């Protein structure tokens, strides 16, 4: 177990190193920050001073070591566009994105898994057909269309929910959360559902397919032949066996939730990382882009680590593989 | 035909199993009748596709749709069980009829420990407490020959070899002391070197627990060593049923003769026999009359017209016109 975690951590570090290298090389090859910050009017001295201050005159390996060292301390340099430290910008924006993705993932799981189980167990019921048909819509409509439709229906026509921005924010130990107030939830609900819909349908269909597959296996037949209760077979033996692929997909999907959150944040003017990143791209704001890259990579690595640990908890075959072979 | 006051443990009467398909109804099992007495081992043999597994599955109520019992009855200790409501047949499974499947590698849930699967089964059918069920599970694992059961009980299926897993499967089938075990090719998937061990174990345990066995196999050698009686199936029908020595040494049905070729020990008997040509007909191509007639070396006119029923011959029952005393015999002797 420990060896497994150490091995995974080691892999994670290598991945982060490579990503750090890539994001660092952005600075070397994309645009000239001094030009961007001072514009064409800056004097030679001004330029030189800025170059020195940004550390652009050091040899490249030294710059990289500085970069990594600073990144580890949470310093990502100054935003070219806003002239503010990037870590401050991120600290403002990150909670918004994380909460959005978290609530979306939760909705996708808590609704998708039960729907998948239901449609897997009751293949021919009319409700299953409704679920499957509606889910086709969820898969085929682009996120922004769904978002705009929701704004139109719940925001404009019905006037139930606010259509843009975050609200009801409470400060909680340096973390600005909108999950503690009703107002906060009224703001996050529509963007989160919009973002969740695609994953939700994906999870539902996956769980359903896995359920159908597992219900055909010999061990389920054998469980029936021993007269176990349907409840124990369906929600114990069968559901647990569908979890492994669901965990995999969910791990991957949290990544795409992060990616799609850029669109959702734009549609709902959600003040998160995605919006920051888009504005960063428009301005070739390298420090912002590079930090976004590193941060996203960090998310993926951490999620992968969690997924691996979950496998470990669910599947005993992995456990003994790493402990050293099966006993016979 | 039993006149004894006590009904046989299992009584299958005129069982017919159908599959409705777009191109009509396929009859996979047709008019099958047999009994199993308490504690008896009935071997069921026949080529692959003869309907052995379907017959076994229908007894325990696990026929998979669209397959259905369209005719006949099944009685367990005198009680009709083929038309029970779901909850009733569920209680019969495991507690009155146990089942052993072919492949031990896929029969056990990979995510649950062996002990959990045993304890869950025991507690589903009894009032035993968790510790009592656990103790029973450990005892059973010991009984089926798993070394250090106290340790092994908490291990997962993948930590057991194929043979050991089939022992666990047998323990699971027997853990609530059912009166009948249906074993569907319990050794086919196993290494040849351990097949005999598993069969011996199955037979010994069932006799110790007082369980009768319906042993489905296509291995006549296994039957010869294990069964009290044998039922031979061909194309969804019974060809011959009788005591094991009778069927093996003095097979009456021409198809049984052919099957005997598969026992190496009886090579002397096999010398006289020509290996049966051809293969079993598909369900939509079963010939009229005797289903075996296109392959039968002794077929005669009547065989293609009339379907033979089981008739008593010596101590067996045989479905073959050769033994119909009333009609004139025109069987060819070669
Ligand atoms: N779902 C099904 N649809 C149509 N035919 C089936 C189905 N399941 C089994 N059969 C047919 O039933 C026959 C008997 O099968 P089975 O009982 O498994 O044979 P055995 O166990 O003797 O090898 C086979 O010919 C098979 O093709
Ligand atoms: S009834 Fe005729 S075809 Fe069938 S086994 Fe007997 S002799 Fe052969
Ligand atoms: Mg079979």
Image (cartoon, coloured by chain):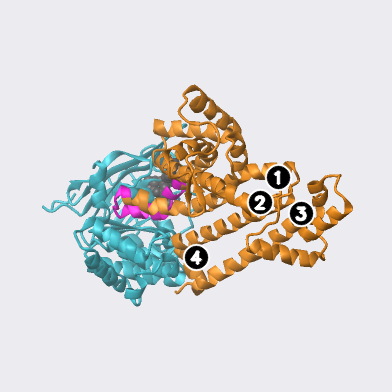
Chain colours: A orange, B cyan
Q: Which residues are magenta?
A: A211-231
Asked if the residue at label 2 sits under 8 Å from ligand 1, the reply is: no
Q: Residues within 10 Å of mark 4 (few under 14, many from 20)?
A: some
Q: Nearer the viewer, mark 1 or mark 2?
A: 1
Label located before the other in sequence (1 or 3): 3
> Helix, strand, or loop for circle 3?
helix
First reached walking from the N terminus: tag 3 or tag 4: 3
Q: Secondary structure at mark 2?
A: helix
Pair 1/3: label in front: 1
Indicate the chain on which mark 4 is placed: A
Q: Earlier in the sequence, mark 1 or mark 2?
A: 1
Report how far apart the C-alphas of labels 1 and 3 lie in the structure: 13 Å
Q: Position of residue A18 (x, y in %)?
A: 70, 61
Q: On the picture, is B34 further left or further right than A21? A: left
**Horizontal and vertical percent position of residue A295:** 63, 54
Q: Secondary structure at mark 4?
A: helix
- In terms of sequence position, does the residue under pointer 2 or pointer 4 come before the other? 2
Pick whichever, A124 or A324, lies toward us: A324
- Residue A280's label in the rendered image is 1
Disc 2 target residue: A292
Q: Which residue is mark 3?
A: A26
Measured Cα–Cα span from mark 3 to mark 4: 39 Å
Q: Which mark is residue A318?
A: 4
Front-lying residue, A201 or A320 = A201
Is the residue under label 4 in contact with that under label 3 (CB below 8 Å)? Answer: no
């Amino acid at each position: 177990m420990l060896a497994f975690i150490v091995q995974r951590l080691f892999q994670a570090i290598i991945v982060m190193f490579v990503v750090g290298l890539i994001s660092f090389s952005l600075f070397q090859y994309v645009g000239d920050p001094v030009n961007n910050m001072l514009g064409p009017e800056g004097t030679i001295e001004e330029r030189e001073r800025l170059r020195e201050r940004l550390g652009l005159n050091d040899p490249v390996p030294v710059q990289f070591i500085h970069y990594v060292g600073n990144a580890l301390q949470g310093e990502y340099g100054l935003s070219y566009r806003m002239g503010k430290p990037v870590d401050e910008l991120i600290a403002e924006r990150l909670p918004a994105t994380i909460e959005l993705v978290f609530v979306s993932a939760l909705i996708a799981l808590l609704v998708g898994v039960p729907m998948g189980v239901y449609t897997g167990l009751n293949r021919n019921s009319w409700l299953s057909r409704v679920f499957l048909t509606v889910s086709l819509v969820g898969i085929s409509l682009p996120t922004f269309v769904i978002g705009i439709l929701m704004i139109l229906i719940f925001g404009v026509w019905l006037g139930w929910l606010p259509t843009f921005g975050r609200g009801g924010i409470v400060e909680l130990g340096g973390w600005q959360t909108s999950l503690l107030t009703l107002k906060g939830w009224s703001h996050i609900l529509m963007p989160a559902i919009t973002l969740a819909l695609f994953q939700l349908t994906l999870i539902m269909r996956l769980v359903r397919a896995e359920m159908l597959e597992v219900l055909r296996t010999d061990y389920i037949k054998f469980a029936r032949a021993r007269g176990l209760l349907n409840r124990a077979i369906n929600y114990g033996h069968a559901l647990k066996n569908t979890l492994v692929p669901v965990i995999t997909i969910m791990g991957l999907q949290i990544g795409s939730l992060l990616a799609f959150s850029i669109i959702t944040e734009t549609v709902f003017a959600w003040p998160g990382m995605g919006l920051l990143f888009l504005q960063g791209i428009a301005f070739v704001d390298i420090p912002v882009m590079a930090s976004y890259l590193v941060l996203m990579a960090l998310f993926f690595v951490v999620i992968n680590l969690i997924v691996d640990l979950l496998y470990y908890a669910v599947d005993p075959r992995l456990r003994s593989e790493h402990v050293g072979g099966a006993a016979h | 035909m039993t006149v004894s006051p006590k009904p046989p443990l299992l009584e299958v009467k005129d069982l017919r199993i159908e599959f409705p398909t777009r191109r009509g109804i396929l009859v996979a099992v047709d008019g099958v009748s047999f009994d199993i007495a308490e504690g008896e081992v009935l071997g069921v043999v026949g080529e692959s596709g003869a309907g052995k597994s379907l017959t076994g599955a229908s007894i325990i109520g696990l026929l998979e749709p669209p397959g259905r019992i369209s005719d006949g009855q099944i009685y367990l200790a005198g009680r009709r069980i083929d038309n029970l409501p779901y909850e009733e047949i569920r209680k019969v499974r495991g507690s009155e009829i146990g089942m052993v499947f072919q492949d031990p590698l896929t029969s056990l849930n990979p995510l649950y420990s062996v002990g959990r699967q045993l304890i869950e089964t025991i507690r589903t059918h009894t009032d035993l407490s968790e510790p009592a069920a656990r103790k029973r599970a450990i005892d059973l694992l010991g009984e089926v020959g798993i070394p250090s059961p106290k340790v092994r009980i908490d291990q997962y299926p993948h930590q057991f070899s194929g043979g050991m897993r089939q022992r666990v499967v047998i323990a699971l089938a027997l853990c609530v002391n059912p009166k009948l075990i249906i074993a569907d090719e319990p050794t086919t998937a196993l290494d040849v070197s351990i097949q005999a061990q598993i069969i011996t174990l199955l037979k010994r345990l069932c006799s110790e627990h007082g369980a009768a066995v319906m042993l489905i196999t296509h291995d006549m050698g296994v039957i010869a060593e294990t069964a009290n009686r044998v039922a031979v199936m061909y194309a969804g029908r019974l060809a011959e049923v009788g005591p094991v020595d009778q069927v093996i040494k003095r097979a009456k049905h021409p198809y049984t003769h052919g099957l005997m070729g598969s026992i190496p020990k009886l090579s002397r008997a096999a010398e006289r026999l020509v290996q049966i040509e051809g293969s079993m007909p598909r369900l939509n191509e079963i010939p009229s009359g005797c289903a075996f007639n296109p392959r039968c070396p002794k077929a005669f006119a009547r065989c293609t017209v009339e379907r033979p029923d089981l008739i008593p011959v010596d101590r067996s029952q045989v479905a073959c016109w050769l033994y119909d005393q009333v009609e004139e015999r025109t069987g060819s002797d070669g």
